[in-house]
Amino acid sequence: MAEIKDGILGGVRGKVGTVVGYQFRGKNIIRAISQRSSKAASGAQILQRSKFKVVISFLNGVRKFVNTHYPIIEVDGEQKIGIDQLRSTIMKDGLLVIDNTLQIIPQRVLLSIGVLPPAAIKKIGFLKDYKVKVQWDDTIVNVLTQPTDQLIVIAYNDELDAFHIEENVAKREDKYAHFNLNENWTKGNIHFWSVWKSADQSIHSTSIYHTPLVLDKYSIEEQDKQEQEAAE
């Protein structure tokens, strides 16, 4: 049963026969209820569904961040928030089939779009205690940049299909910083993006993707143990 909230001329919410009414981004929408087809899905349909599933899984961990750091655009009279824009981009140009498996191409993923000039990241690496060390050059400046601009680093573990977002890592003037990844991250290729944000949060940079690092705590610990035993 459907409900009319604002009189006979208002929007309809719920099912009426073969149509359903709902509100989407402030607009009242009515659409036909889709009918299940007994026809088997084609290869192209199966591939498209698989792509959608992989992309949605990938984006779940950064949905809020992307929506906050993308401008809302209008396409064909409809507003598209950040996650919709990024999903479309990845579906079109950000997937690769390797050994019959769909994989995200991280280099083609923009997690933010903005006008603040970023500092040039010189190096990202692991320290012995598995902290991440980041170094950058703060000489890229213009009227928008400030020494107090803050660094955000987004890390993605492809082994776990999980993100870690480290905000307020350091200020632009600091030139380097250390931070910890999630404790349960013991293995995987770790992909990194950097984003800079003004101290008052009013503007931010477009994200930059960086060379990934291989994390394998167990093999390193086992190697250290073997070397220690051999020394004894």
Image (spheres, rainbow, N blue to C red):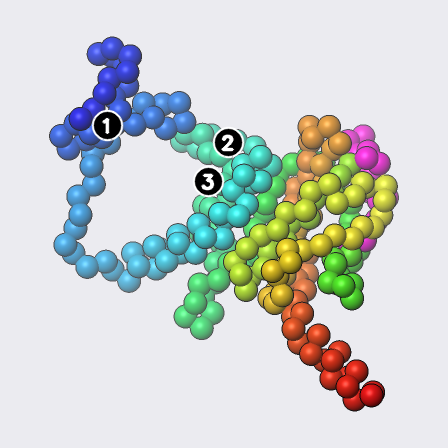
Pick whichever of labels 3 and 1 is earlier in the sequence: 1
Which residue lies under the disc numbered 3? 84
Residue 14, magenta (yes or no): no
Give the left or right position of residue 43, taking residue 36 as reference.
Answer: right
Measured from the top left, where is residue 160 in percent x and y? 53, 61
Gap between marks 3 and 2 measured at Cα = 10 Å
SS class, disc 3: helix
Q: Is residue 147 above or below residue 163?
A: above
Quarter of the C terminus within the rendering: bottom right
Identity of the amino acid at label 2? Ile
Measured from the top left, where is residue 59 in percent x and y? 50, 48
Give the left or right position of residue 154, taking residue 60 as reference.
Answer: right
Residue lying at 39% horizontally and 52% vertically, measured from the top left: 52
Closer to us: 108 or 227: 227
Residue lying at 48% horizontally and 62% vertically, measured from the top left: 103
Callout 3 crowding tier (Cα within 10 Å): few <14, some 14–19, many ≥20: some
Which residue lies under the disc numbered 2? 73
Callouts 1 and 2 close, C-beta under 8 Å: no
Task: Pick out the residue farthest to the front.
Answer: 232
Q: Main secondary structure of the magenta part?
A: loop
Quarter of the N terminus within the rendering: top left
Gap between marks 3 and 1 measured at Cα = 25 Å
Measured from the top left, where is residue 8 in percent x and y? 22, 12
Which residue lies under the disc numbered 1? 14
In magenta, the rendered stretch is 134-148
Pick whichever of labels 3 and 2 is earlier in the sequence: 2
